[in-house]
Image: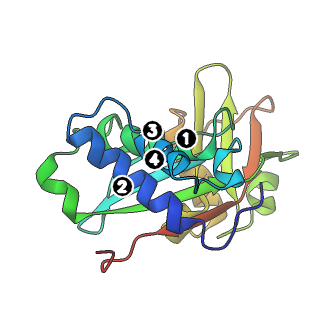
């Protein structure tokens, strides 16, 4: 999917409005997308299938991050759904309280298609990764799966360390390795609210 450079001008308000609607007791976070369609201003790329992650940050710290790896619904709906999930259903955090909402900054990332990463060893995986560019998915059997967005490179710039923390996120021990593991990479286009968003 090709997105315009100003896609964030729609995606960020959709994410924020979805969380706001849920805090106000509205049943669904798809209202912002429906409003766009009713006004005849929903572009084709917003209605096409897309996979996104929505990240919430408060006081410089992660406050929630939930996303979709495989496109299975219109991008606008996916962003709204993931915004609500990040705010209220990320198991690492308590549900977002209304008093916190104004202090939250939102980032929306839209994922490219995933590409299998061939490898011959753990070292070959870390050598193939492009710091600052690649998001990575690790799958190890039916129960161990994790991903890091490319933004995680800001905190873990060393590929071996990046891979180590990805294994931990997947619930695997530090020394784990299996030739049956599956690795995929993807890139993202992302947009982030600034502190002066209002």
Identify the mark at residue 91; answer none if there is no mark: none
Asked whether disc 2 touches disc 4, contact meaning CB atoms under 8 Å apart, the reply is no
Cα distance between the residues tagged 1 and 4? 15 Å
> In this orientation, does residue 144 appear?
yes
> In this orientation, does residue 156 appear?
no
Give the residue at x 36% y 38%.
90
Q: Please determine whether, in this image, residue 104 is positioned above or below residue 116.
A: below
Q: What residue occupies the far top of the structure in this picture?
A: 142
Cα distance between the residues tagged 2 and 1? 13 Å
Is 118 positioned to the left or the right of 111 in the image? right
Give the residue at x 54% y 66%.
8
Where's residue 134, x and y in %? 70, 60
The mark nearer the N terminus, 2 or 4, is: 2
Which quadrant of the figure has residue 89?
A: top left
Identify the mark at residue 16; answer none if there is no mark: 2
- Depth check, mark 2 against mark 4: the one in front is 4
The residue tagged 3 is: 30
Is 9 positioned to the left or the right of 158 in the image? left
Q: Quadrant of the N terminus?
A: bottom right
Q: Secondary structure at mark 4?
A: helix
The residue tagged 4 is: 35
Where's residue 13, x and y in %? 42, 60
Q: What residue occupies the far bottom of the structure in this picture?
A: 196
Q: Residues within 10 Å of mark 3 (few under 14, many from 20)?
A: many
- Depth check, mark 1 against mark 3: the one in front is 3
Cα distance between the residues tagged 4 and 3? 9 Å
The mark nearer the N terminus, 4 or 3, is: 3
The residue tagged 1 is: 78
User: Relative to the observer, which residue lies in front, 178 or 18?
Assistant: 18
């Amino acid at each position: 999917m090709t997105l315009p450079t100003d896609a964030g001008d729609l995606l960020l308000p959709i994410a924020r409005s979805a969380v706001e609607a849920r805090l106000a007791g509205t049943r669904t976070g798809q209202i912002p997308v429906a409003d766009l369609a009713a006004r005849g201003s929903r572009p084709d790329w917003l209605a096409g299938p897309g996979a996104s992650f929505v990240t919430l940050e408060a006081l410089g710290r992660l406050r929630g991050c939930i996303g979709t790896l495989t496109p299975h619904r219109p991008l606008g709906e996916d962003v709204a759904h993931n915004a609500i999930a990040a705010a209220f259903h990320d198991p690492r955090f308590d549900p977002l309280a209304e008093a916190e909402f104004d202090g939250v900054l939102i980032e929306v990332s839209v994922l490219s298609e995933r590409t299998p990463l061939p490898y011959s060893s753990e070292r070959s995986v870390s050598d193939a990764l492009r710091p600052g560019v690649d998001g990575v998915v690790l799958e190890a059997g039916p129960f161990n799966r994790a991903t890091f967005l490319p933004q995680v490179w800001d905190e873990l710039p060393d590929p071996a360390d990046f891979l180590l923390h990805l294994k931990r996120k997947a619930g695997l021990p530090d020394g784990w390795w299996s030739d049956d593991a599956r690795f995929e990479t993807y890139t993202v286009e992302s947009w982030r609210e600034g502190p002066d968003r209002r």
